[in-house]
Amino acid sequence: MLAFQISSPDGKKQRVKLPDRDVTIGRDPSNSITLDDTKVSHFHAVVILRDTGDYVLRDVGSSNGLTVNGEPKFRHVLRVGDVVGIAPYAIAFLGAAEPSEGVDDTRALRLPRKPPQAGGTGFQPVRTGKMPVPASPGELGPPTQLDPVVALRQLPTAATTQGVNWAGMTENRALHVLQCAQAIAATSSVQAMLARLLDSVLSSLRAQKGFVLLAEGEHLAWRLGKPERDPVRALPAATSAAVYQALESRAPVLSSAVAPGGDDTLCVPLVGGSDAMGVVGAEGRFQAPSPTPGLDVATALCALCATHVANARERDRLQQQCSRLHQAVEASRRLVGCSEEFHDLLAQVHKAAKCDLPLLVLGETGSGKDLVAESVHRLSARASRPFLEVNCAAVPETLLESEMFGQEAGAFTGAVARPGKFEAADGGTLFLNEIGDMSPVLQAKLLTALDKQTIVRVGSNRSIRVDVRVLAATNMDLPAMMQNGRFRPELYRRIKCLEITVPPLRKRSCDILLLASYFLEQHVPRPLNETLRLSNETAKLLLAYQWPMNVGELRNAILAAAIRSTGDRIEPGHLDDAIAGSKAKPVVKTLAQVEKEHICEVLRLAGGNKREAARLLAISHTTLHEKLKSYHLHAVDDATNG
């Protein structure tokens, strides 16, 4: 919550608390803080919460500008104690505050003043075609000369196709439209933008109820309702017809009330570019011999703001895409290694992520099967949806069915209705770890769920459709279990559409020291991890040990040794006895490994110059180039060094 203290011209002070989202200030009743004075523009300023955590005050094109601590400002990062001057009002920024118990902090502030003169239009009066220029320089921020009527008439054709009569609009109404549109465009989220647009449209039409529908793929999604209502509620047939007609004609459509005394529905389309992207609807009594008052303002607002809404939605889409890419990168970083076996594993992970088939991950205990499964999900098209895990070995057999498929109230003593992991993972991925421990009876129900993409809760006979990709993992020999009748062959064939085998750590010894360094960096607390390293003797012992529990055992050994260490090195004495007592075995290298290492050493001596390295190796430049290519080695160009 944000706290403000508003001092009115008569000396009265009032403290308010508002949600720390976008806070708008102006004379229009739809503002978060409403200041009733003719010197205050309908939409005067906005306070925006930035990603950095700063609250930024910005003038949204007011007539008389604003000051902060007595100085004219157009944009200002607010600090606690700053006093914002708007016309005769002083607004002190008090910073974050806890909401007061029993107080509706979300309602807009209303500050009374003398009633407007009879016959007033309710809009800020403008005597000339141009906005008045302040007497003091900088009062409006950057100097501007703006003719709102001319500006509106010069809008792109895309906005005029909604039937907006810009030429026939009075100057004060045109200025009101422009100020409302500026305030709407200044909001930072799609939902806040739609809420501000709906409030402005309802205010112009003198209506109290309305809604916003936006196109999402092949559907129209309910995004907002005022007052709040059940979004699942079906629209009346007449209203639905008006919505679709407004989308097709790209012009406002009025649907008369069916029941006597009922509300009419006025639908105004949101046209972004060449497509109608949604509808703003208002409900009230609109039937009249003459055109509905305020329709020109409502239509103009929707025309002006449609592009802003479309841009904000595209920004959100790109942010979600960046988030998915970030998750994918993080998932890849959690898989650590440099050996050929590791790169083969990584290639299989990327291939599995490109399809939607079930996947079986095989490997010894502690080899990282769960990380492989999660990486497949994070790299797939389902990355933005849930990734849930069920450990079939850790959940008792009597509860595993409810855990996976959910249960209905009364299914057994004390049972309450709740969804299972299949329903919770809808649209995403369900990882069944240690699937070899699942009972044959439950295997049959899982097979049905995979084949029909439907599940049935415990205690129910109603099928529920789900969209879930299933990944499974085990360290057991499933073919041998099928021979013994402990695993269903049909299920084995179903989950084995794709298969990845994670190699044990002893078969990729090149990754041991890299993994040890990773665990020191990621899991040892700072500042210890900034100086702690392995001694040469410790590194040799780690390479000599067979690691029967694989990567999990290595991680635990490194963390335990880091706690036992007293200096800046992990010595053999800090390791467990089993690891410290291991003896280094002679390493037998292949001819290719010896040749690769020798070429690397000669390249180092030659400063990376391939021609000089070829001379030292007594081979041709072409032969060296082919060997570098086959071993995935790189050297600097000859021109650089010679």
Image: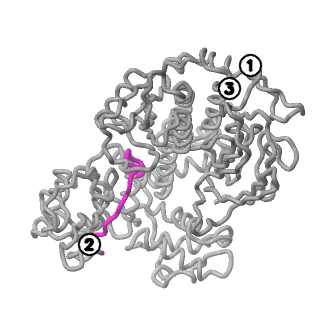
Query: Quarter of the image containing the C terminus?
Result: top right
* Left or right: where 447 falls relative to 76: left
Task: Answer yes or no: is residue 642 visible.
Answer: yes
- For image coordinates 26% across by 48% down, the residue present is 357
Closer mark to the observer between disc 2 and disc 3: 3
Label 1 Cα crowd, 10 Å radius (few <14 / some 14-19 / many 20+): some
Percent from the top left, x then y, of residue 298? 53, 29
Q: Is residue 181 above or below residue 371?
A: above
Q: Which of these two is toward me, 603 or 614? A: 603
Closer mark to the observer between disc 2 and disc 1: 1
CA gap, disc 3 and disc 1: 9 Å
Name the residue tied to disc 2.
416
Name the residue tied to disc 3.
172
Q: Is residue 6 above or below residue 58?
A: below
Number of numbered markers: 3
Instruction: Please give the range of residues in magenta.
Output: 378-394
> Considering only order in the chain, which callout, 1 or 3, is on the residue closer to the N terminus?
1
Query: Quarter of the image containing the N terminus?
Result: bottom right
SS at circle 1: loop
Percent from the top left, x then y, of residue 431? 31, 60
Q: Amino acid at mark 2?
A: Val
Main SS of the magenta part reads: loop
Name the residue tied to disc 1.
129
Percent from the top left, x then y, of residue 223? 44, 43
* Left or right: where 586 falls relative to 204: left
Q: How is the image coloured?
A: one colour
Label 3 Cα crowd, 10 Å radius (few <14 / some 14-19 / many 20+): many
In the rendered image, the residue lying farthest to the front is 118
- For image coordinates 67% across by 27% down, the residue present is 175
Decide: marks 2, 1 in contact (CB < 8 A)?
no
* Left or right: where 219 falls relative to 321: left
Q: Is residue 405 magenta?
A: no
